[in-house]
Image (cartoon, rainbow, N blue to C red):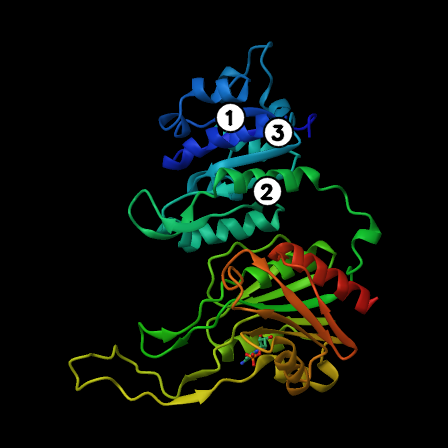
Amino acid sequence: MGDKRVLLIVGGGVAAYKALLLTRLLRKAGIGVRPILTKAGAEFVTPLSLAALAEDKVYQDLFSLTDEHEMGHIELSRSADLVVVAPATADLIAKAANGLAGDLASTTLLATDKPVLMAPAMNVRMWLHPATQRNIATLKADGVSFVGPDEGVMACGEFGPGRLAEPEEIFAAIIARLEDRPARPQDRPLVGKRALVTAGPTFEPIDPVRGITNRSSGKQGFAIAEALAKLGAEVTLVAGPVALPTPVGVERVDVETARQMLAASQAALPADVGVFVAAVADWRVDETFGTKLKKEKGGPPALTFVENPDILATVSATGPRRPKLVIGFAAETDHVEDHARAKLARKGCDWIIANDVTEPGVMGGGENAVLLITKDGTERWDRAAKDEVAAQIAHRIAQALA
Ligand code: C5P
């Protein structure tokens, strides 16, 4: 990494101090950092601290770059292997999505021919606003990649997605982008193949404000969608309500209920492989209430439940439109292999990937320990990070579809 250089655009926001920590991590790894500080960014961190940590000059003003000893803005925008925007404010994101170029940061983003990685940070309402989401979608379509935002309590006191990813997380995303080499055909065995992945929980409403859901984080399913896309597959990711960024190159369809998830999954067919990772609610209430249930109204309500459609079993039985390879997941707490093998038969799928959810950190955590169960036998995989498990699953899928 010693010969790599990052152009780091630091936007305004309370989280801008994390850009200093990020700069230190990058320098420690021997990566060059050339900082651009926006006017708003300079309200939160000083050019002096940024310059000291980056061990480079800090660029701030578009119109001071005219001196012949200075680097012109076009040259500046191309002087790095990767352009990183951290924090990427709603304003910077909107400018970049629309090709505006009124200051040094936005001009650089418009003029660059290098890959761009953005780490957004803003108030949760600004992040969830359709305008921001539209801009993010535009930038993704333009090939910009994203890390975060994370969910949590924000400086403004609100809770939700919008927090700048931690410096370590941004650092890891930068390393991954810097290591991205042009893929060789043998590295993309799934080119021309279509994949459907379901992920996350479902949300089954009871009344306008309440519902039934579960603790699925969506991480494993999102990681599988990403791993399949990396191998070249055209991936549709049908996601329940989770606050995870859409993996690069993946088409995402957001749904809430099991019935919506089934409809979106069926609409994504035909596919060569279907991977059903979502934790679908088994039941929904028979009739949802149009107005909020009041506790004053004579004790707890009597809810009646009906069974939700089984998406995995339904798609497994779709006749000619059935994906060649159908993979289900099984979260078990005991007799993992026996229960999972029974599930394989009951659901009519080809593989079951089973995990023991009593293991610490599996449900909602970053790691997974799985059994791969096929008609031919059972394999026990070592405990590993969810994205490593995902990469392994994607490779096995590629072998099976070859
Ligand atoms: O029956 P169980 O919920 O344990 O089965 C888990 C597997 O079935 C997972 O792959 C899950 O995504 C899928 N499933 C589904 N639709 C349901 C219930 C489970 O696709 N309604």
Crowding near the residue tagged with mark 2, few <14, some 14–19, many ≥20 C-alpha atoms within 10 Å: some
Crowding near the residue tagged with mark 3, few <14, some 14–19, many ≥20 C-alpha atoms within 10 Å: some
Q: Residue at x 62, y 78 (%)?
A: 266
| Vertical position of residue 116 compared to residue 7: above or below | below
Pair 1/3: label in front: 3
Instruction: Classify residue 263 by image quadrant.
Output: bottom right
* Residue corresponding to mark 1: 36
* Percent position of residue 80, x then y: 64, 28
Ligand 1 is within 8 Å of the C-beta of the residue at disc 1: no
* Residue corresponding to mark 2: 173
* Percent position of residue 215, x then y: 45, 67
Disc 2 from disc 1: Cα separation: 19 Å
State whether residue 102 appears in this view.
no
* Percent position of residue 224, x then y: 64, 61
Q: 138 or 22, which is in the foreground?
A: 22
Which quarter is ligand 1 in? bottom right
Task: State the SS at label 2.
Answer: helix
Task: Decide which of tag 2 and tag 1 comes sooner along the chain.
Answer: 1
State whether residue 310 appears in this view.
yes
Disc 2 from disc 3: Cα separation: 14 Å
Disc 1 from disc 3: Cα separation: 20 Å
* Residue corresponding to mark 3: 29
Q: Is residue 179 left or right of residue 142?
A: right
